[in-house]
Image (tube, rainbow, N blue to C red):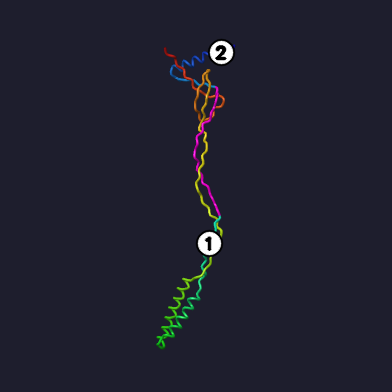
């Protein structure tokens, strides 16, 4: 029985090889034993953002709120001075007093703006900055595979690990003289 099965198997193999030689396929599929697998790596640069934060002392100037005392005082002084130096009587003197009060008030306001008071305060504020860093990593790109088929060793490169056996395509053609 074994002999009969072997004879049929051999006949089928010869028939498939004959069909291949006839132009249907130029090869047949088989598997070979893997002897060695070496991973292949390449170095790649990887860029990534990195946030860096720190605490920083910051000075703040706070202007005093508006004060009307210099303007009012300037107006009073201007009005009194204008009234005293005015030689006229009646409406002329009244107009000079009003004009002096207005001019004195404007001068008092300007002086208060130039010499306006205020104070400083210091606070701690959080500052952050994002910078881009890079590092190198090893990236697996494939495998150098050594395999044995019919007593001979071959080497190929694959993208994936082949395991214990690797599928191969065997070409069959007649040997010329």
Q: Is residue 74 above or below residue 154?
A: below
Q: Which residue is mark 1?
A: 59
Q: Quadrant of the N terminus?
A: top right
Q: Where does residue 156 sit, x and y in percent of width and height? A: 49, 25
Magenta stretch: residue 45 in it?
A: yes
The mark lying in front, picked from 1 and 2, is: 1
Q: Which sits in the foreground, 36 or 28? A: 36
The residue under the point 51% across, 41% down is 135
Q: Where does residue 167 sit, x and y in percent of width and height? A: 52, 24
Q: Quadrant of the C terminus?
A: top left
Mark 1 lies on a secondary structure that is strand
Q: CA distance from mark 1 to mark 2?
A: 97 Å
Residue furthest out toward the bottom = 89
Q: In which quadrant of the rendered view does residue 99 lie?
A: bottom left
The residue under the point 48% across, 16% down is 17
Q: Horizontally, is 104 left or right of 122 in the view?
A: left
Q: Which residues are magenta?
A: 33-54
Q: Residues within 10 Å of mark 2 (few under 14, many from 20)?
A: few
Residue 142 badge: none
Mark 2 lies on a secondary structure that is helix
Q: Which residue is mark 2?
A: 6
Q: Where does residue 159 sit, x and y in percent of width and height? A: 51, 30
Q: Residues within 10 Å of mark 1 (few under 14, many from 20)?
A: few
Q: Is residue 142 above or below residue 154?
A: below
């Amino acid at each position: 029985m074994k002999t009969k099965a072997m004879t049929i198997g051999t006949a089928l193999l010869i028939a498939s090889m004959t069909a291949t030689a006839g132009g249907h396929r130029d090869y047949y599929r088989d598997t070979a034993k893997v002897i060695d697998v070496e991973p292949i790596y390449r170095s790649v640069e990887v860029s990534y953002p990195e946030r860096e934060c720190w605490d920083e002392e910051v000075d703040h100037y706070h202007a005093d709120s508006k004060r009307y005392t210099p303007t009012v005082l300037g107006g009073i002084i201007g009005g009194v001075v204008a009234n005293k130096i005015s030689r006229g009587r009646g409406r002329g003197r009244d107009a000079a007093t009003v004009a002096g009060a207005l001019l004195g008030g404007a001068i008092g306001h300007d002086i208060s703006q130039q010499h306006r008071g205020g104070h400083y305060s210091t606070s701690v504020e959080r500052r952050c900055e994002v910078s881009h860093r890079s590092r190198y990593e090893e990236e697996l790109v494939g495998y150098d595979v050594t395999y044995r088929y019919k007593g001979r060793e071959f080497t190929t490169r694959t993208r994936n690990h082949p395991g214990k056996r690797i599928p191969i395509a065997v070409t069959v053609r007649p040997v010329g003289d």
